[in-house]
C-alpha cells in the first residue's frame, strides 16, 4: 500500500503513526515533492470511486486564486479539475491510502486508516 502525505499535516502524521503501530507494509509518497501526474490522479479517483472535486481542498489560497469553488462539477469539467490538481498538488485532499485490493481511501480518520488496513 502507498500513502500520499504532506508531512506538515497532522492527519497525515496520525495516519502514518497508526500504520506503524499496526505494523503495516507501506510506502510514503510526499505528493507535494513527488507530484502525481494527471494519469495517477485519474487512477486514484477510480480507486476511490470519487470525482476530482470530491478530493479538492477548495479552501486553500491557491484554490481561491483559481476560483475553483465556482467551477462546474460535471463530467465535462472533470479534466479541468484533474489538471488543476496535478498543477497545484496542495489542493489534493490528504492523506490518501491506496490499498492492496486496488481500492483507495481518504484516510482523514483512524477508522478510514483501519478500513484501508483491512482491505
Image (cartoon, rainbow, N blue to C red):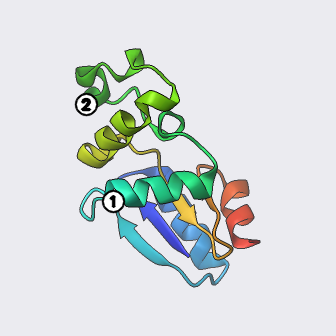
- The answer to whether 25 appears left or right of 9 in the picture is right
Foreground of the two, 24 or 78: 78
In this rendered view, identify the residue nearer to me: 101 or 12: 101
Check disc 2: other Cα within 10 Å, few if <14, some if 14-19, many if 20+.
Answer: some
Q: Which mark is residue 116?
A: none
Q: How many marks?
A: 2
Q: Residue at x 66, y 62 (%)?
A: 113
Q: Nearer the viewer, residue 107 or 73?
A: 73
Q: List the residue tagged with mark 2.
A: 62
Q: Viewed as shown, does residue 95 lie left or right of 82?
A: right
Mark-to-mark CA distance, 2 and 1: 17 Å
**Residue 87 rendering spot, x and y as whole percentages:** 24, 45
**Relative vertical location of residue 112 with respect to residue 70 in this rendering, above or below:** below
User: Could you say whether the residue bearing mark 2 is in a helix, strand or loop?
Assistant: helix
Q: From the top left corner, tell me how far across and down residue 54 is, in percent.
A: 54, 36
Q: Between tags 2 and 1, which lies in front? A: 1
Q: Residue at x 31, y 28 (%)?
A: 63
User: Can residue 37 be seen from the camera position used here?
Assistant: yes
Residue shown at 65% from the left, 64% from the top:
103
Indicate the position of residue 104 as horizontal and vertical percent values: 61, 60
Asked if residue 57 lies left or right of residue 21, the reply is left
Residue 105 rendering spot, x and y as whole percentages = 62, 56
Q: Residues within 10 Å of mark 1 (few under 14, many from 20)?
A: many
Mark toward the start of the polypeptide (2 vs 1)? 1
Q: Is residue 11 above or below residue 118?
A: above
Q: Residue at x 48, y 33 (%)?
A: 53
Q: Say which quadrant the C terminus sits in.
A: bottom right
Question: What SS does tag 1 mark?
Answer: loop
| Residue 6, visible in the rendered structure | no
Find disc 1 in the rendering and name its residue.
36
Q: Quadrant of the N terminus?
A: bottom right
Amino acid at each position: 500500500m502507498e500513502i500520499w502525505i504532506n508531512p506538515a499535516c497532522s492527519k497525515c502524521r496520525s495516519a502514518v503513526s497508526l500504520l506503524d503501530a499496526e505494523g503495516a507494509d507501506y510506502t510514503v509518497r510526499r505528493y507535494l515533492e513527488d507530484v502525481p501526474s494527471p494519469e495517477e490522479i485519474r487512477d486514484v479517483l477510480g480507486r476511490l470511486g470519487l470525482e476530482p472535486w470530491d478530493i479538492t481542498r477548495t479552501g486553500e489560497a491557491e484554490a481561491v486564486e483559481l476560483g475553483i469553488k465556482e467551477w462546474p462539477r460535471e463530467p465535462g469539467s472533470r479534466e479541468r479539475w484533474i489538471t488543476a490538481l496535478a498543477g497545484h498538488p496542495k489542493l489534493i485532499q490528504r492523506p490518501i491510502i491506496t490499498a492492496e485490493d486496488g481500492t483507495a481511501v481518504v484516510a482523514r480518520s483512524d477508522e478510514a486508516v483501519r478500513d484501508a488496513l483491512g482491505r
